[in-house]
Image (tube, rainbow, N blue to C red):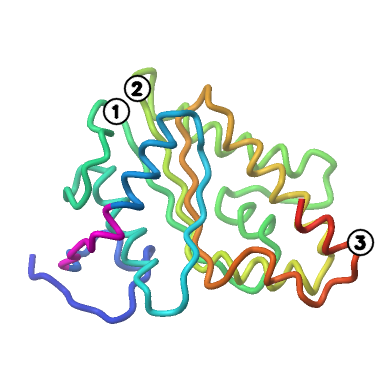
Amino acid sequence: MAIKYSPSVNIIRDSNRDLGYIPTPNAERIAKLIASNFSDGLRSFTLIGSYGTGKSSFLWAISQTILGKKRFFDLGFDNYTAVEALNMVGEFSPVSDYFANYFGVEDSKKIDFTQHIFSEIYNRYHGLGKGNRLLLLLIDEFGKFLEYAARHEPEKELYFLQQLAEFVNNSDHNILLITSLHQNFDAYASKLNEPQRNEWTK
C-alpha cells in the first residue's frame, strides 16, 4: 500500500491508511508517559495543543502501535492478546447522544440511558475474550463536545463526562481513553456563570 501524506488527519477515515507518520521526541515522550501512567492504574488522558500541532496524527499513531499494525512507539503493550480501538471525532452536539448513536443505544428519556451506554462499552470490552484484553477509546476534537456543553445544559453534559471518566478509570479493566483538545479544559467554561464554572472546574 502506498504511503499517504495528508496535512489533515481524521482518525476514523484514516484508521486503515498508512500515513507515513514520523514521531517527534515530544510525541515519544507523551506516548511513554501515557503507557507508564496506564500501568500505574490511570485510564484517561487528554492531549492539549493548538491547531496543527499533530494531535490527530498522534492519536492515529498510538492506535496503530497498540493494535500492532505499526510500531511508532515503545509502549510495552505487546502482552495483550486482544485489542480493539474505537475511534470517534467530536461534533457540536451532546456527547451522551454521540455515544448513544455510536453504541446503538436508543431512547434517551429512559432513566437508565447513561448506564445502558456504559453497559455497551463494557460489552465491547468483554467481547474481546477472556485473555489479556485492551479496549482503546480515542476521541479527537473533544473540544466540540465541550463547546456544546458550555452553551446547552452544562450541568447535564458535565455529569455524563464525570460518569464516563469514573467508568473508564476503573483499574480492574484495561480500557484506555485518550481525548484531544485545542485549549485547556477550563477555557471552554468562559461564558458560564460562577456556580457553573465552579462545577466545571471540579
- N-terminal of the pair, mark 1 or mark 2, is 1
Instruction: Report the disc number at residue 132.
Output: 2
Q: Which residue occupies 84% across, 51% down?
A: 109
* Alpha carbon separation for disc pair 3 and 2: 43 Å
Q: Which residue occupies 76% across, 56% down?
A: 201
Residue that label 3 marks = 195
The amino acid marked with disc number 3 is Pro
Residue 196, above or below 32:
below
- N-terminal of the pair, mark 3 or mark 2, is 2
Instruction: Report the disc number at residue 80.
Output: 1
Count the numbered circles shown.
3
Task: Categorize mark 2 by other alpha carbons within 10 Å: few (<14), some (14-19), many (20+).
Answer: few
Q: Nearer the viewer, mark 1 or mark 3?
A: 3
Q: Nearer the viewer, residue 57 or 30?
A: 30
The amino acid marked with disc number 1 is Tyr
Task: Say if mark 1 contacts mark 2, CB within 8 Å.
Answer: yes
Q: Mark 2: which secondary structure? A: loop
Task: Categorize mark 3 by other alpha carbons within 10 Å: few (<14), some (14-19), many (20+).
Answer: few
User: What residue span does the magenta drawing correspond to?
Assistant: 20-28
